[in-house]
Amino acid sequence: MSRALLVIDMLNDFVDEKGSLRVPDTAAILPRVAQEVVDARARGESVVYVCDAHRPDDPEFSRMGWPPHAVRGTWGARVVDALAPGPSDPVVEKTTYSGFHGSDLDRVLREREVRMVRLVGCVTNICVLYTAADAAMRGYGVEVVRDAVAGLDPEDHAFALRQMERVLGARLVDREAP
Ligand code: ZN
């Protein structure tokens, strides 16, 4: 079964110290995510970057109360340099929590005959959780690399991991040794 690594929202605004919506725990997961990318490529698996790309007036900023972040075309919306996508890696833009909503992620995965997605990135209980939910409901197998996803709040992080495992049938895995 073909598998793809989904690198979720490892963007300057979420990861960099100067980012507008920094998720502090991304500092700890960054080397593990980088190793996941290296390993996926070595196995010949697709690496798909799933990235917030908002309009400056996106309702996520007003209705959902987030500070403006990852505005399309800005530095904040770029994948951090340490994880820069390769020339053949798809970069899928999204405008809300699920990587599938209003994006071409499903088509990108189908074209590559992917049936299993492996999730890393941030935020555990937001974009990771809702992308996992959508993937599971669309019939994809889901793996979540427990120590390569970052939350903003430890309780929400733990809840989301439990929810993905028990309700969505995701397999929680630890970073594989290189
Ligand atoms: Zn966003």
Image (cartoon, rainbow, N blue to C red):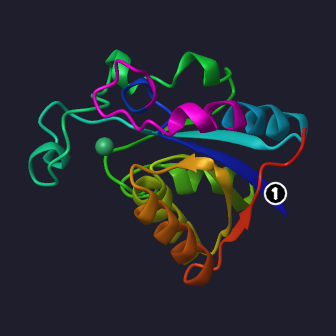
Q: With 62 as the anchor, is 89 left or right in this view?
A: right
* Residue sitting at x 48%, y 63%: 129
Give the answer, above or below, for where 76 lies relative to 57.
above
* Residue sitting at x 77%, y 56%: 174
Instruction: Give the quarter of the image for residue 132.
Output: bottom right
Q: With 177 as the anchor, is 108 left or right in this view?
A: left
Viewer-closest of 159 and 108: 159
The region drawn magenta spans: 15-32
Q: Is residue 27 magenta?
A: yes
Q: Name the residue under label 1.
A: 2
Q: How crowded is mark 1: few (under 14 residues within 10 Å), some or many (20 or more)?
A: few
Instruction: Give the quarter of the image for residue 83.
Output: top right
Amino acid carrying mark 1 in the image: Ser
Q: Which secondary structure lies at badge 1? A: strand
* Residue sitting at x 36%, y 16%: 75
Q: With 100 as the anchor, is 139 left or right in this view?
A: right
- Image quarter for ligand 1 equals top left
Quadrant for the N terminus, please: bottom right
Q: Does the magenta stretch include residue 173?
A: no
Quadrant for the C terminus, please: top right
Q: Where is residue 18 in the image (x, y as percent from the top left)?
A: 34, 18
* Residue sitting at x 16%, y 30%: 56
Q: Where is residue 72 in the image (x, y as percent from the top left)?
A: 31, 27
Please indicate, yes or no, whether residue 134 appears anywhere in the rendered image. Answer: no
Give the answer, above or below, for where 160 lies relative to 13.
below
Q: With 135 as the anchor, is 153 left or right in this view?
A: left
Give the answer, above or below, for where 121 lies relative to 85.
below
